[in-house]
Image (cartoon, rainbow, N blue to C red):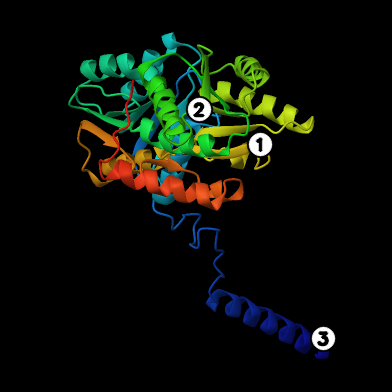
Amino acid sequence: MKKMLSLSLVMLLAVSVMLAGCGSKPKEETNAGGTTGGESTEAKSDLQIGMVTDVGGVNDKSFNQSAWEALQATETETGTAVKYLQSKSDEEYIPNLNEFVKGGYDLTWGIGFQLADAIKTVADQNPESKLAIIDSVVDSPNVKSVTFAEEQGSFLVGVVAGLTTKTNKIGFVGGMDSPLIKKFEVGFREGVKAVNPDAELISNYTGAFDKPDLGKAAAATIYNQGADIIFHSSGATGNGVFNEAIARKKQGQDVWVIGVDKDQSLEFGDDVTLTSMIKKVDEAVKKVNQEVIDGTFAGGSENLTLKENGVGIADTSTKNVAADILAKVDEYKEKIINGEIKVPTE
């Protein structure tokens, strides 16, 4: 009897536990996005934006890299899918652009003036597509062209170089000898001349935007001629200019490089970077991306100057440029903005 009573109590207890379990609510697991079921709360977009680099490549420490960083920021902030294709030669421009256009991407970027003809061809063949280009004007209704007043920003770093040089010899290393790169050289020359007419400018064009070894050789030649400051506008080729200056710094030589497009002190350090001529490629790219997202995209061209803060000098310039020189830079900046000085482009 006692055995049967004990068995009944055990069975009753088991049933009670089962019933209690059936009545409880299971605990939900939350993922990193803050929701249940594996879905993220982050805003998602069905839009896709593609970017084709010129031969300088996406890691050129210059404008291709700035453009790609802008696309990545757009992806982070809006959920828009982004992708780049790196061009190793001119022949790859049209196939790379078409990969995005034919793939139904909502916007296709071409970065650099070398893609102008390819952008024009693809845009005219695909009038319903949306394309954009940096550093050249393409006359097609479905293309947004963004250019910059490089000569104005270059004038300002020319003022820095002209007032900083100790040898009165200053260098310029260009990539391809083209109207765009000439704008950098001419603006730089005019800035130097405005504050130091006795200084000599030594120029060297490498003919390439993707050859650091050529940049290093060009810089060595210019430094050997007595220059103590070199401004480069040569994409990834300019990495070699920095490498040559770094090597000379280690040997005790007092030489400097002026960077281009990005604040290149962030990549190569303050020990060798005097200042950088900033071109707001990243902000321009983000702005056009947002126009596509908002549905306000329209073709046409836009030229960004000192007035629009499209060009300028790096904020970190205070580390190596004297305060009185920066004051002089601000003075010339205002003269350019108000039209008192018109910087030539050729």
Disc 2: which residue:
198
Name the mark on residue 3. 3
Residue 330: where, in percent of width, then height? 41, 49
Judge left or right: residue 37 versus residue 186.
Answer: right
Residue 176 percent across, percent down from the top left: 46, 14
Q: Amino acid at mark 3?
A: Lys
The residue nearer to you, when weighing 123 against 268, is 268
22 or 165, which is in the foreground? 165
Where is mark 1, residue-wise?
272
Per the image, label 3 sits on a secondary structure element best described as helix
The image shows residue 110 at horizontal and vertical percentages of 37, 25
Q: Nearer the viewer, mark 2 or mark 3?
A: 2
Q: Amino acid at mark 2?
A: Asp
* Amino acid on which the number 1 mark rests in the picture: Val
Tag 3 near tag 1, CB within 8 Å: no
Q: Earlier in the sequence, mark 2 or mark 3?
A: 3
Whether residue 290 is visible here, answered yes or no, is no
Q: CA distance from mark 2 to mark 3?
A: 115 Å
- Distance in Å between CA atoms under marks 2 and 1: 24 Å
Determine the CA span between mark 3 and mark 1.
92 Å
